[in-house]
């Protein structure tokens, strides 16, 4: 890790600032002193043993210190011991990935001298955040200066300060030089090439590295379908007898696509050292509350909330609310069909250019309304999930994802299902799919690329003016950088990014056989998505902390579910085609049974394929098994040595 910035702590030793702590403006001096002492204190005394210093701001007349912004760093020895504490995996001298241990540090590849450069800046910031999060109260009954903010032994100090608004924000600082290098290799030059996934992971961590890896893989996987779709669209799109072949290809593609991704994901995770890494013990969320009790696992005091009460909130409030929202979504859909009928009646009365344009207006309005409803529902879903009071962040995320996915699926695809299987109007289905897809992509590009770029330019100008007014002619780039980054919005994770790809995957896999250009439009969207997301991560939002993940989590299940629904949808579309109906001129029941039988066979084929194709490549399985065997042998040897030492000590 290299940093172009450095500050000095109160002892005079210089360190690279990695993490920024911002306290509320009216924070009591007692609380500040107590927090800083706990951060600096030795580990054996219950401290984090980190370096911390107030942000120094130079005025025109005198030097003063900001009472609320603090810079946190660490010595290399502390970071290396922290890497062992958090269970980082690094490449060993023999090429395998092993859990890092400070005692065997010299045996790890790329460890030279004192280890400078051995850890990435993202790993260093993750280690510091981990040490801050595990900073626990000892004998304090309350936060000094705040008698009402109660503490108890074992309570996370940082989480308590965050939940009470005393600690406003904690964020990792950008490294200007490294960010500039990443920007040039990633998105500043428009070129047809793979993304620098290793560099992205090195700077932002595995969570974002895997997201951009999935985005790249999804885009390349769509290219064959896009190439097949272009001639299909140009020469056969009005002949619906021919969409059967495209539907069959769609079925095979959506089946193989996710199975191959699992293998690619495993290779990336192994290379980055997260595939065999043990999941850390989850602490309660900062917003979790309840009556003080004991955790049966850790034995520590912490809030306890009855699971029965949470289940009542979910089934008596959250589920009815979601069902009400789904009903409203279906009601809006029926209004859209009324608008379609109105536009069609005007066109039938007077067919001309303007009335033909009017035919697309209802779909455009409906696409905009869908995006607005998705946005409003997202806020409501977050509020409800917070109110359910989940203890763990993983449980919170799973319930939020489930709520959002169900609503988004119904809101975005219900009208297409209705047109395809109730109205059985393939012309309207193609028109609606094209309009929904194009309108949603335009809105997403405006919201994710143009609007953030414009807002960031305005914010930069304001910060430059404020800093210049405060410092006069003197230039302090660190102060300017921290003020600029502290004013940025917090990046809320890859949730919205995966959700967008999930919906695009739905448009492609469910109904693209009637609109073959869907895959091409998604490819073009994802190419621009790479650049807009890269700019957004680097310059619009605060730098996120690294997330050591080994896969895309619950989104893998979401995509697989969509793939299974795509089998049913495409089989039904094939059954509705005139070409297939011609084989069953007077036996509709036989047609339905045949379609259902084919659908079950394909679903069975999907499950067999998922079972036959291993999620982890064979060579990685062998390396993991070898590492596990060596660990067991080392443990046996250690126990034998301990057993041999016991008789000697008895003598």
Image (spheres, grey):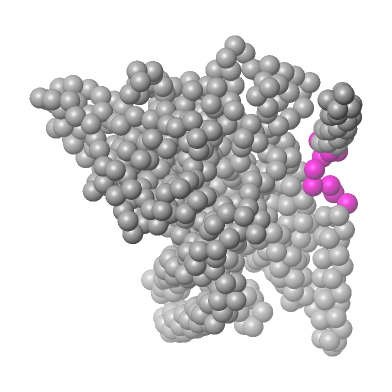
**Residue at x 35% of width, y 40% of height:** 34
- For residue 614: magenta? yes
Q: Position of residue 643 (x, y in %)?
A: 88, 30
53 left or right, relative to 210? left
- For residue 82: magenta? no
Q: Quadrant of residue 631?
A: top right
In this rendering, the answer to whether 512 lies above or below 536 is below
Residue 506 appears in the figure: yes
From this viewpoint, which residue is outermost toward the top? 113
Q: Quadrant of residue 268?
A: top right
633 left or right, relative to 172? right
**Residue at x 26% of width, y 42% of height:** 29
Residue 513 appears in the figure: no
Residue 130 or residue 181, whichever sits in front: 130
The quarter of the image holding the C terminus is top right
Q: Position of residue 585 (x, y in %)?
A: 83, 84
Residue 481 or residue 594, whichever sits in front: 481
From this viewpoint, which residue is outermost toward the front? 651
Residue 176 or residue 9, whichever sits in front: 9
Q: Which residues are magenta?
A: 612-621
């Amino acid at each position: 890790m290299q940093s172009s910035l450095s500050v000095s702590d109160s002892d005079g030793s210089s360190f690279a600032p990695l993490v920024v702590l911002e306290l509320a403006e009216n924070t009591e001096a007692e609380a500040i002193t107590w927090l800083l002492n706990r951060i600096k204190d030795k580990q054996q005394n219950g401290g984090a043993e980190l370096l911390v210093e107030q942000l120094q701001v130079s005025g025109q007349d005198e030097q003063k210190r900001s009472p609320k912004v603090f810079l946190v760093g660490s010595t290399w020895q502390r970071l290396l011991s922290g890497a062992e504490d958090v269970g980082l995996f690094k490449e060993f001298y023999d090429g395998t990935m092993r859990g890092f241990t400070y005692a065997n540090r010299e045996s790890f590849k790329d460890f030279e001298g004192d280890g400078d450069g051995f850890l990435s800046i993202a790993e260093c910031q993750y280690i510091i955040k981990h040490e801050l999060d595990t900073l626990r109260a000892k004998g304090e009954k309350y936060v000094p200066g705040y008698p009402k903010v109660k503490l108890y032994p074992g309570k996370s100090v940082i989480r308590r300060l965050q939940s009470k608004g005393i600690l406003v924000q904690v964020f990792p600082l950008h490294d200007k030089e490294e960010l500039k290098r990443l920007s040039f290799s990633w998105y500043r030059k428009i070129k047809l090439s793979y993304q620098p996934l290793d560099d992205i992971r090195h700077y932002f961590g595995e969570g974002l590295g895997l997201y951009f890896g999935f985005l790249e893989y999804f885009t390349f996987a769509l290219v064959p379908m896009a190439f097949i779709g272009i001639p299909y669209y140009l020469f056969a799109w009005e002949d619906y007898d021919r969409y059967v072949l495209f539907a069959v290809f769609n079925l095979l593609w959506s089946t193989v696509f996710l199975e191959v991704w699992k293998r690619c994901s495993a290779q990336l995770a192994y290379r980055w050292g997260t595939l065999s890494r043990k999941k850390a013990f989850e602490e309660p969320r900062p917003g979790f509350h309840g009556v003080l009790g004991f955790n049966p696992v850790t034995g520590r005091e912490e809030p306890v909330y009855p699971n029965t009460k949470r289940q009542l909130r979910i089934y008596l409030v959250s589920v009815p609310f979601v069902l009400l929202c789904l009903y409203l979504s279906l009601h809006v859909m029926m209004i859209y069909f009324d608008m379609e009928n109105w536009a069609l009646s005007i066109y039938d009365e007077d067919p001309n250019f303007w009335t033909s344009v009017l035919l697309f207006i209802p779909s455009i309005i409906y696409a905009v309304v869908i995006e607005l409803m998705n946005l409003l529902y997202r806020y409501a879903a977050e509020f409800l999930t917070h109110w359910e009071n989940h203890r763990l962040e993983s449980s919170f995320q799973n319930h939020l994802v489930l709520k959002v996915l169900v609503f988004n699926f119904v809101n975005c695809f219900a009208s297409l299902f209705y047109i395809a299987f109730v109205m059985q109007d393939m012309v309207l289905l193609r028109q609606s799919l094209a309009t929904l897809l194009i309108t949603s992509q335009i809105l997403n590009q405006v919201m994710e690329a143009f609007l953030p770029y414009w807002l960031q330019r305005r914010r930069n100008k304001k910060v430059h003016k404020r800093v210049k007014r405060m410092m006069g002619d003197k230039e302090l780039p660190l102060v300017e950088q921290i003020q600029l980054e502290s004013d940025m919005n917090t990046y809320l994770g890859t949730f919205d990014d995966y959700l967008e790809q999930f919906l695009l995957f739905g448009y492609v896999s469910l109904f693209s056989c009637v609109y073959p250009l869907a895959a091409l439009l998604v490819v073009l969207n994802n190419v621009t998505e790479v650049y807009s997301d890269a700019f957004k991560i680097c310059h619009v939002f605060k730098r996120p902390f690294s997330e050591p993940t080994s896969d895309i989590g619950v989104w893998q299940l979401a995509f697989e579910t969509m793939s299974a629904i795509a089998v049913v949808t495409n089989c039904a579309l094939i059954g509705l085609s005139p070409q297939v109906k011609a084989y069953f001129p007077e036996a509709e029941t036989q047609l339905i049974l045949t379609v259902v039988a084919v659908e079950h066979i394909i679903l069975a084929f999907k499950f067999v394929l998922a079972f036959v194709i291993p999620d982890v490549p064979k060579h990685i399985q062998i390396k993991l098994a070898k590492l596990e065997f060596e660990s067991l042998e080392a443990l046996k040897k250690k126990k034998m040595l301990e057993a041999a030492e016991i008789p000697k000590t008895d003598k």
